[in-house]
Image (cartoon, rainbow, N blue to C red):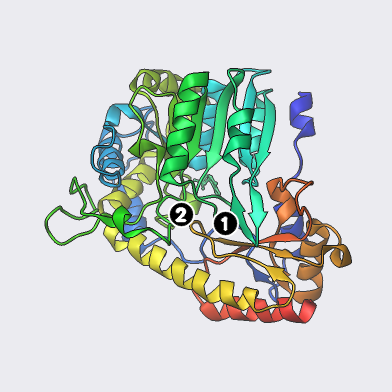
Amino acid sequence: MRQTVLNLEESMIRQVANAGMGRSDVLKFWFGESDEATPQFIRDAAAASLQQGETFYAQNLGLPELREAISGYAQGLRTPGATKIGADRIAVTSGGVNALMLAVQALVDSSDEVVVVTPVWPNLTAQPAIMGAMVKCVSLKPVAGAWQLDMAELLAAVTIKTKVLILNAPNNPTGWTLSREEQQTLLAHCRETGTWILADEVYERLYYDAPPEALRACPQGAPGLGRPGAGQSRPACAPSFLDISEPDDRLVVVNSFSKSFLMTGWRLGWLVMPPAMTAQMGKLIEFNTSSAPVFIQRAGLVAIERTLDVTPRVVAHLKTCRDTLIPLLQALPGVQVAPARGGMYAFFRLEDQARFGDSLAIAKSLVLDAGLGLAPGNAFMVNPDSDAQGWLRWCFASQDLSRLEQGVQRLKSWL
Ligand SMILES: Cc1ncc(COP(=O)(O)O)c(C=O)c1O
């Protein structure tokens, strides 16, 4: 077995979940998914495809009609004047995590330097490590519970030696979101250093504090996104590197059906890349999964075509969840938290950390002693020098808001 594989750490979120498995009295907020099943019309599309016998291999890069639909969807979310996102730049993948792994396989050689902005979902550091890369982390800084990028520090870290800069914004777990200006600075810098940007934008639609100028009229009238001039606004969407880049930039953007379409278990995602890279990516897909299953892609196609029937409702509800949970947490003495600008998590800190030990110990104690299932902050590579301990992640995607209130009551009693 390769040493890099032996060195991979067991997921800390799993360790906490294992502690509470089989206990129906635990309120579970540890995983990053909604407790609402995929809408019926999406399930029906997969069932119909199976009924019609669509059980065969598909094109490596995905069904042409799905790639076209994703192209229209992605373009419709962009600001006017943004680069063209043709279907020739798109590959359909088996989930966002597969899209990320494919991008890393395509870009990272053993011993390459990769810079990752943390705290972050652990897969983003594990995947380049599996390829044998040297992973350098640059940490966001917590200021009164909200996480901020020290741009000077990141620019100093990304040099001509850096093969890939990996960013996830809106961010899991902190909710931190890159501003347009920050993206412009980073893109200009990476053009100079010859560094690829791998942007994980799976939470782009889960964006709550869009400034009014981000909601100007929908330019393209893309499938499922409304038509220009019909009184529709451009849907809320976090700033994307696709808004400001050229097709040939060293940029790969990862997206997923999981979060915006309530499709976590389906394992369907996509990549946007420079056109010259697409055929190479097709080869890599052949050697990884060969293709996403056809009936899953049919479901994805309907989800994209009927985005308006899913995503706005999901995002509005998640905003209500956020606005329910955060003030309740803020009202607890010793809890530091700021509202997430995007994503589906409250990332908060128990200030009196010394009393409780590290965040894994806290999360396990919360499960066993309070029946509250949260993810430990340490799982996300919180920088040990900066207020390391006592961070916890709470996925607030709950259909029933009273579960969030009950959870806060349990935390309060435990504290
Ligand atoms: C930041 C981030 N990227 C990518 C993913 C992958 O999502 P999926 O593989 O379900 O598409 C997740 C899932 O939680 C995530 O949090």
Q: Is residue 290 visible in this depiction of the protein? A: no
Q: Is mark 2 within 8 Å of ligand 1?
A: yes
Task: Please name the amino acid that badge 2 sits on.
Answer: Lys
Residue drawn at x 49%, y 25% as measured from the top left:
190
Q: Marks 1 and 2: CB-CB under 8 Å?
A: yes
Which image quadrant is residue 157 in? top right
Residue 320 position, x and y percent, is 46, 73
Q: Is mark 1 within 8 Å of ligand 1?
A: yes
Task: Please name the amino acid that badge 1 sits on.
Answer: Gly
Classed neighbour count for the residue bearing mark 1: other residues with Cα under 10 Å, few (<14), some (14–19), many (≥20):
many
Vertical order, 58 against 340 (above or below)? above
Which image quadrant is residue 69 in? top left
What is the number of the mark on residue 259? 2
Q: Give the structural element (helix, strand or loop) at label 1.
A: loop
Q: Along the line of sight, which residue is nearer the eye, 155 or 355?
A: 155
Q: Residue lying furthest left in this view?
A: 229
Classed neighbour count for the residue bearing mark 2: other residues with Cα under 10 Å, few (<14), some (14–19), many (≥20):
many
Q: Could you tell which of marks 1 and 2 lies nearer the N-terminus?
A: 1
386 left or right, relative to 78: right
The quarter in which the C terminus is drawn is bottom right
Q: Which residue is mark 1?
A: 32
